[in-house]
Image (cartoon, rainbow, N blue to C red):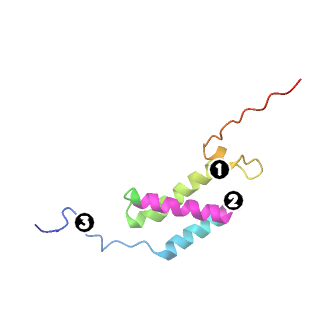
Amino acid sequence: MTNAPVGVADLTWMPGLTNQDLRDAADRLVLDRCDVPAGSVLRTFSRSVRTALLDGFLTSEVVAEAERRTRDLLAQRPAAGSRPRLRAWAGVRAPEVPLPRRSR
């Protein structure tokens, strides 16, 4: 029994994913969204890169797809002035605590 890969394409001819491409895209996103903290933008971009890679995008398409996904996710984010609590924004409901009865 051999461990030869079956059906794997040779991707050596394709341009790779470089750190410079990722940095340039991250810089563009941070400059475009001044209303969102830079750390939030970078975390969202990092998650978008990871999901684009997991979804099987070619390395030459990952940066553009991750940038598109990041812009979409940040567009869904509420404005800074009227931001609800993070739990509500993430769709997590807080448990409702009953109010105590008033004594008469």
Vertical placement of residue 26 versus 92, above or below: below
The residue at 72%/58% (across/down) is 35
User: What is the three-letter code of the residue carrying label 2?
Assistant: Val
- Mark number, residue 77: 1
Please identify the quarter of the rendering in which residue 44 is found: bottom right
Label 2 sits on residue: 36
The residue at 86%/26% (across/down) is 103
Vertical placement of residue 102 versus 19, above or below: above
Q: Where is residue 95 in the image (x, y as percent from the top left)?
A: 65, 38
Please identify the quarter of the rendering in which residue 37 is found: bottom right
Q: Where is residue 101 in the image (x, y as percent from the top left)?
A: 80, 28
Point out the stretch of residues depicted in magenta: 32-53
C-alpha span from label 2 to label 3: 40 Å
Quadrant of the image for the C terminus? top right
User: What is the three-letter code of the residue carrying label 1?
Assistant: Arg
- Tag 1 secondary structure: loop
Give the residue at the far front of this rendering: 103
The residue at 55%/73% (across/down) is 23
Label 3 sits on residue: 9
User: What is the three-letter code of the residue carrying label 3?
Assistant: Ala
Residue 40 painted magenta: yes
Quadrant of the image for the N terminus? bottom left
Say which label, 2 or 1, has the lower sequence index. Answer: 2
C-alpha span from label 3 to label 1: 39 Å
Q: Nearer the viewer, residue 20 or 43?
A: 43
